[in-house]
Image: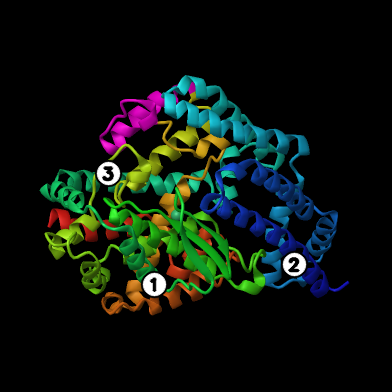
Amino acid sequence: MSNNSTISELVAWVQRAHRLGTIGELLGWDEQVNLPAGAAEQRAAQHAVLAESLHAAASAPRIGELLAGLEQRDDGLNDDERAIVAQARRDYNRATKLPTEFVREKAIQGSRGYHAWAHAKAQDDFAGYAPVLQKNLEFAQREAAYLGYGGAPYDYMLDKHDPGLTAAAVDRLFGELKRDLLPLMRAIVASPAATRAREVAGRLRGFPVDAQLRFLREVTERLGFDYTRGRIDVSLHPFCSGTGSDVRMTTRFKEDHPLNSLFGAMHETGHGLYEQGLPVAQLGTALGIHAGMAMHESQSRLWENQVGRSRAFWRSFEPRWRELFPVQSAGVTSDELHLAVNAVQPTLIRVDADEVTYNLHIVLRFELEKKLFAGELAVRDLPAAWRVASREMLGLEPANDREGVLQDVHWSDGSFGYFPSYCLGNMIAAQLWARVRQLRPGIEEDFSRRDFSWLLAWLRENVHAPARRFSALELVRRVTGEELSPRHLVEYLRERYGGLYLG
Ligand code: ZN
């Protein structure tokens, strides 16, 4: 059998499993957007059947045979084929190397963990949750060992979300970021403008939901989201799922926090544009899937922050905003609006954090995860360690664990190693943005004319089209000509927020 026909057969198997996965995503989307209250159990049963089919498809012995054959004749493969084989191997190992019993136990533990966390958070009872967390940690370490990462379980957790990422690399990047960002954040927070920004943001009240929806629909369409290949709905927690020609975004509306809905939607639009930019014919293979969570997050952050919080963006959209909200915007000047859009205030809660302080929330979580996995921190000591880190990073100490170690859902089902991708996404976004401004110094004039086409085309060609041919770090190197560095993020924040707060 030639390499060509073997690759074609492998791709067919891989895409079949991927399609089953996307059906599961669609069920998940429907669950969060449309599900009747009484249908939860029926839906859970549907998920279970689908999960079985998916596992059978992803672990089919024929995939193993095809991979073994291709790996033996590796020198006959071109770069794209090699990328397809490497990604298929990665997926196949994940599907076959974990014992069935372990997968079953872990699924039960994950669901139990979620409920234990929800209960502990409501009751502010970390002690009751600690044994669950301990068990999640052990499951994660066992999983890493099954996949060949016995000596470096935290590297495995990072690699799971971002292929090729290591704790050492994150450690270096975050260390440098923390050193430069802390003094900048403290200076911004101490400035009188910080108080004014909060005051103005607090004045934005009573924005009718239907007009908010109209505005964000116009904005996201203008940014380039293709509504013939995607849609936006309302859910409790905003998310983006689906890929290729069927991308589902969600948002939520609060009449007294109109900017949250808008920026949440622009964030999800960034995720959606990335998925819509992947080559549809190759979906599911390395040539048609995203490069990892950090790269994904870079796309959402770039549209939300570098674009959506810029002066130029608001120069073009402010008139329409005032037209839709004449009463609510009456007492707010353009300068005040811009300040409110870029309000900075340290908060204990990560999901409420602004663009500047958000990164410190992530560095805090990374440092604790790293110590947990290295055995340098015991689960029972987490709340105290959290308080110390929170005081150092944010200048705030949580009065209880609900506002501290219990605030996030991630660890409850064993999703360790996920947090860093948020902050790496900010770094990547800033580095891509620096490159964009070199290549097109007048880009903000485009924005002033509501023209985002150059930026989208550039991202399509340089970031979306390569899909998963390269790791995130390698892709950044290729696109920007240098290694990923926190320098660009710090410079971007200094320029935007320094002007507003420290001018
Ligand atoms: Zn995101």
Q: Which mark is residue 11?
A: 2
* Amino acid at circle 2: Val
Position of residue 392 in the picture relative to residue 91 (left or right): left
Point 69% across, 65% down: residue: 84
Choose top left, top right, bottom left or bottom right for residue 368: top left
Choose top left, top right, bottom left or bottom right for residue 270: bottom left
Q: Which residue lies furthest to the right in this view?
A: 1
Mark 1 lies on a secondary structure that is helix
Q: Mark 1 points at which residue?
A: 223
Mark 3 lies on a secondary structure that is helix
Residue 376 visible in the picture: yes
Q: Mark 3 points at which residue?
A: 182
Point 49% across, 27% down: residue: 119
Q: How many residues crowd around disc 2 within 10 Å: few (fewer than 14), some, or many (20 or more)?
A: many
Question: What stretch of residues is rendered in magenta?
Answer: 380-404
Point 29% across, 32% down: residue: 391
Determine whether label 3 and label 2 are within 8 Å by CB: no
* Amino acid at circle 3: Leu
Marks 1/3: CA distance?
33 Å
209, above or below 104, in the image: below
Mark 2 vs mark 1, foreground winner is: 1
Position of residue 48 in the picture relative to residue 303 (left or right): right
Relative depth, front residue between 118 and 184: 118
388 drawn magenta: yes
* Amino acid at circle 1: Leu
177, above or below 272, in the image: above
Please provide percent x and percent y for residue 326.
18, 65
Point 22% across, 69% down: residue: 318
Q: Tell which quarter ligand 1 is in.
A: bottom left
284 drawn magenta: no
